[in-house]
Image: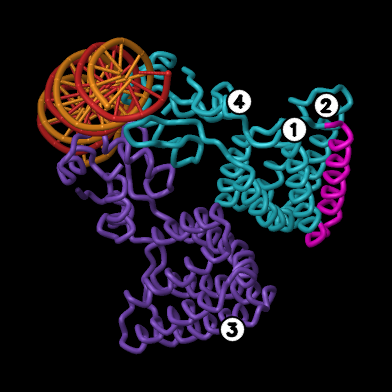
Chain colours: A purple, B cyan, C red, D orange
Amino acid sequence: MLAQRELERMILSGELAVGSKLNENGVARMLGISRGPVREAFRALEAAGLVRLEKNRGVFVRQIGVAEADEIYELRAVLDEYAGRLATEQASPLDVADLRARIDRMERAVASGDLDTYHDANLGFHDRLVELAGNAKMLALYRRLVNELSLHRRATLDQSGILAVSLGEHRAIVDCIGSGQAAAAGRLLRDHVLASRERMHQNVRPGQAVPLTTRDRQSA
Amino acid sequence: MLAQRELERMILSGELAVGSKLNENGVARMLGISRGPVREAFRALEAAGLVRLEKNRGVFVRQIGVAEADEIYELRAVLDEYAGRLATEQASPLDVADLRARIDRMERAVASGDLDTYHDANLGFHDRLVELAGNAKMLALYRRLVNELSLHRRATLDQSGILAVSLGEHRAIVDCIGSGQAAAAGRLLRDHVLASRERMHQNVRPGQAVPLTTRDRQSA
DNA sequence: TGGGTGTAGATTGTCAACAATCTGCAGATG
DNA sequence: CATCTGCAGATTGTTGACAATCTACACCCA
């Protein structure tokens, strides 16, 4: 039960590299437990889409390719448009202020060049927005998609110019939410996600395909 | 690995009643295996949303209430509208003919009063439609939602009048797909799903809340 | 009689050992 | 020299046993 959360944390933080093999004995020793609970955690993580199980061969941290990331971004665009519409109808002035504060936090992070904080705040902003929509099932699906996207380890050569654009999009979205323009909020949110997808593509091209040295790497 | 599929089948078919407790030893004996693999299957099924785990108390087949079913229907409406648009762009004439054949099968089932066959064909029709959209991740999410909806055991007092209406909606959808009207196909599909939600509500009202006798029932 | 309490049985959580399968390498063979 | 074969070690799949926790019922007491 706890092993699953710890493994999930390590996978999402990148502590366990994408594509690396997870040895049952190794993980068990690392967590100070036996193989039984580790295997159970693996099964749960597989259903959550974070690892891949190969019968009699072992489990691997899942690798999300560009094509699959594309699919996920398009799904997010559809869900986010809906979430934006609902959130506009549901959000209180306090909620809007909270969203603005999150954007401010992102802006400060960009100004100080702290990309990690920016990334966290960005995830938090979108998560809060979907949460405001008030559909718990959608929030669960959304989080799953975001988790899977984090398995698409791209070069992350975020240039501050791109981040500034993204910041502007965020502000426009919250302005629509604050002024009750549901349809416009949804549309901007969808466009924002699709633009993020394009930004990912531009990051992927220089690096080409995923280097082989990161596949089936040993760890734990 | 196989235990999970068997349990999933038994849950979705209703062989294991919604809300019933699944005893580890009982399931293990039933499947002719030991408790270890059973516990692994439980963890996977929990992540799939089919069972609910309560620490030190056991696992129960999940119960979907009206509020949650509502959320799922609204999500399906959003996804299906998108799927309808994509499917229209992707579908070949053969695909359209296949969809029509599925509707014919539903019609025959209604005519002969075979509600089980109608239900299967209906699920198959929508599944195929989402599959045609060509987004594998969306298909996976869609199937998960449909699975969860089957945990909302309503009275299923399907009257043939209602089914006829549903059949007509199906034909209109495929007509749009066949004639390349993507936006219209999406809109009709969304409306169809939302209408299904309303039909569920009308089925729920007479029966009121779920009777207590079906909760935490012993089985396996 | 109603309600709290303790205990016996059942059930879940965990572990270590055994069986089945895979992997890597050394040696044979053409 | 390349390829196939077979074994040794490592890893996964499964099992039965033990510890921790919960549940239900009998019992006691006000």
Q: Which chain carries label 4?
A: B
Residue placed under numbered mark 1 in the picture: B121
The answer to whether residue B5 is above or below residue A87 is above
Which residue is denoted by mark 3 in the rendering?
A: A175
Residue B44 location (% of width, % of height): 42, 37
The alpha-carbon separation of the residues under discs 2 and 1 comes to: 9 Å
Secondary structure type for disc 4:
loop
Label 3 Cα crowd, 10 Å radius (few <14 / some 14-19 / many 20+): some
CB under 8 Å between discs 2 and 4: no
Q: How far apart are marks 3 and 4 (CA)?
A: 48 Å
Q: Where is residue B34 in the image (x, y as percent from the top left)?
A: 33, 18
Type of amino acid at the residue the image marks with label 2: Ala
Q: In this view, does A22 lie to the left or right of A190?
A: left
Q: In this view, does A28 lie to the left or right of B28?
A: left
What secondary structure is marked by label 1? Answer: helix
Range of residues picked out in magenta: B159-184
Q: Is residue A36 visible?
A: no
> Is A206 above or below relative to B146?
below
**Chain name for mark 1:** B
Mark 2 or 4, closer to the camera? 4
Does C21 sit left or right of B82 as displayed?
A: left
- Whether residue B182 is in magenta: the answer is yes
Distance in Å between CA atoms under marks 2 and 4 = 19 Å
Query: At 41% from the left edge and 67% from the top edge, which residue is drawn?
Result: A208
Disc 2 is placed on an element classified as helix
Residue B107 visible in the shown view: yes
Task: Look at the image and tell me in which quarter the N terminus of chain A lies.
Answer: top left
Tell me the tag on residue B109: 2
Q: Position of residue B122 (x, y in %)?
A: 75, 36
Judge by depth and name the residue closer to the eye, D1 or B125.
Answer: B125
- To the question of a shared chain for discs 2 and 3, the answer is no
